[in-house]
Amino acid sequence: MTNDPSALDINEQILIETRVTNEGPSLVLAYLFWFFLGIVSAHRFYLGRPVSAILQILSYFIAIGLIWLLVDAFLIPGMARDKRAMLRARMTQERLALHGQAAVAQRASLAP
């Protein structure tokens, strides 16, 4: 089974995009976390990167973390885009699996 969204009809693709928009990370919220709680790497935790968040917190002890925090201001859009892509792939996979189950059930009901 693949993550090919073209295997889904347009309504299901719209459903997935709507869910990604609603459930995906907000850039505004990510930047607010970065600005107000950046010292505890809240933006990285929010964007689903807990390992790098912990590394960032630990790196503050050698001053590299402060530079990293500033660089994150430019990396946040890409991190949010990656998280949305992961959500989209997961939701597409779920819908394709649902279609596979429905096809099997339909074939079973048609069998003599």
Image: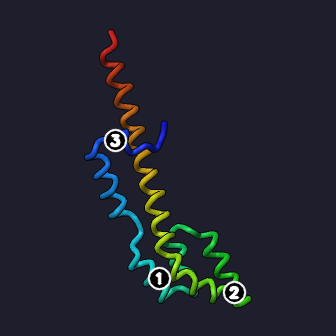
Kind of residue sitting beneath label 2: Ile
Callout in the foreground (1, 2): 2
Residue 44 figure quarter: bottom right
Say left or right for 65 vs 3.
right
Q: Earlier in the sequence, mark 1 or mark 2?
A: 1
Contact between labelled residues 2 and 1, with CB atoms less than 8 Å apart:
no
Kind of residue sitting beneath label 1: Phe
Residue 68 coordinates in the image, percent (x, y): 62, 83
User: Residue 64's mark?
Assistant: 2
Q: Secondary structure at mark 3?
A: loop
Say left or right for 27 vs 13.
right
Kind of residue sitting beneath label 3: Leu
Q: Residue at x 37, y 63 (%)?
A: 23
Q: Residue at x 39, y 45 (%)?
A: 5
Residue underneath mark 3: 8
- Tell me the CA gap for discs 1 and 2: 19 Å
Say left or right for 98 vs 11.
right
Neighbour tally class for label 1: few under 14, some 14-19, many 20 plus, Cα within 10 Å: some
Neighbour tally class for label 3: few under 14, some 14-19, many 20 plus, Cα within 10 Å: some
Q: Earlier in the sequence, mark 3 or mark 2?
A: 3
User: Residue 33's mark?
Assistant: 1
Relative height, residue 49 to residue 67 (above, below): above
Residue 87 coordinates in the image, percent (x, y): 44, 57
Residue 10 coordinates in the image, percent (x, y): 27, 45
Contact between labelled residues 3 and 1, with CB atoms less than 8 Å apart:
no
- Tell me the CA gap for discs 3 and 2: 46 Å
Q: Residue at x 51, y 80 (%)?
A: 74
Neighbour tally class for label 2: few under 14, some 14-19, many 20 plus, Cα within 10 Å: few
User: Residue 20's mark?
Assistant: none
Q: Residue at x 67, y 76 (%)?
A: 55
